[in-house]
Amino acid sequence: MDMIKAKRLTAFILLLSIMAMMSLFGGCVRSGIDKAENSTVDTNKSVYNDIYELSEFLTEEQYDEYMNDDGSLFNSLLEFRKRLVESSEFKLYAYCNNFVEVINSEIPETCIVNNDTEFEAESKYIINGENITATEAIQVSENFFTLFPIEITEGRCFQPTDFDCHYSEPIPAIMGTAYHESFHLGDTFEAYYIGERRTFTVIGFIDEESVFYQRSERRMESYERYIVMPFESIKEDSASSRAILLQQICGFIELYGDRSFALQTIQGYLKDTGLEDWNESIVVNSKSIQEKMN
């Protein structure tokens, strides 16, 4: 199968994943240390009243224009993301639940996309004679673990330099506890991510009691069945960079004031960076994640 077909298959499997889930993110601590002490949110009491989801809903026309323009929209989005990250009105925790297609490796069943659903069989296929498994993964920003802390039981957490990485280099990956029998510290594996073949290196394992808010399920979920990877440092324009950058403006925001004011601020950033046409496509959810879990 050529790369164009592989990309189409990736998009198809992603669609099935979305259908099956019916929906559409640092600081780490070592074993034995209170996870909450490094967090801006009291996870033990599940107090997330000021944490809202930030999402993009570009129309097909807007998405095609962004992915195929001369680079102007890409540069505008780079500036828009910078304003989100540096905003004094809220704090952004970039996050995406985008699977990786692991190549020629045994993956625990619980970690396979659409496990235990009617779509599970679609998550295993062959590309260029290699066995591919669509595998659950999340991509996170450097501050994500201050919102949803993890406890490292073996190896290490991400370091600041891991967030300066480019995906042409080996991608550091922290594995959920379900992977203990499949991988070991220092192991490498290959996978397709956004249609491009990448190399991953296992740098650590997460305690099964560490949790994050899974948007599709509207509940807290253990990291145990996920591959956790840092977002790529996007600086230069490319097809994959455009897709990843679009994901980096999504995730969660911690509000310091009124939700409507935060939305107005975001719309102001869009206008200032030449993306005013996206006003209706960048959305702050009307309910906090605390309200969604109640």
Image (cartoon, grey):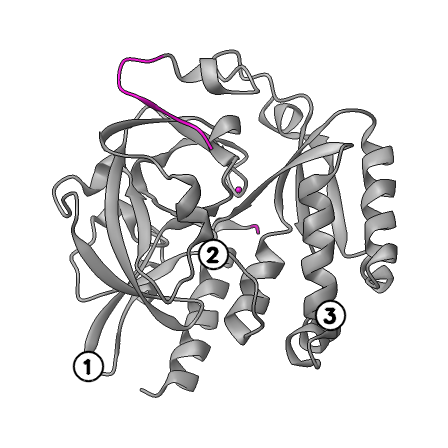
Extreme-bottom residue of the structure: 2
Using a 10 Å C-alpha cutoff, classify the residue at mark 2 as few (fewer than 14 neighbours), some (14 to 19) or many (20 or more): many
Could you tell me the amino acid type at mark 2?
A: Glu
Dot in front, 1 or 2: 2
**Residue beneath the point at 45% across and 58% down:** 17
Is residue 275 at all visible to an observer of this figure? yes
**As rendered, which of 118 and 204 lies closer to the eye?**
204
- Which element carries disc 3, helix, strand or loop? helix
Q: Is residue 180 left or right of residue 137?
A: left
- Percent x, y of residue 134: 33, 61
Asked if the residue under mark 2 is in contact with the one under mark 1, i.e. CB atoms within 8 Å, the reply is no
The residue identified by callout 1 is 129
- Percent x, y of residue 143: 52, 35
The residue identified by callout 2 is 232
Tell me the magenta residue range. 23-33
Question: Magenta segment: does it hold 62?
Answer: no
The residue identified by callout 3 is 73
How far apart in space, not on screen, are marks 1 and 2 (Cα)?
28 Å
**As rendered, which of 16 and 67 lies closer to the eye?**
67
**Residue beneath the point at 33% across and 35% down:** 157
- Which element carries disc 2, helix, strand or loop? loop
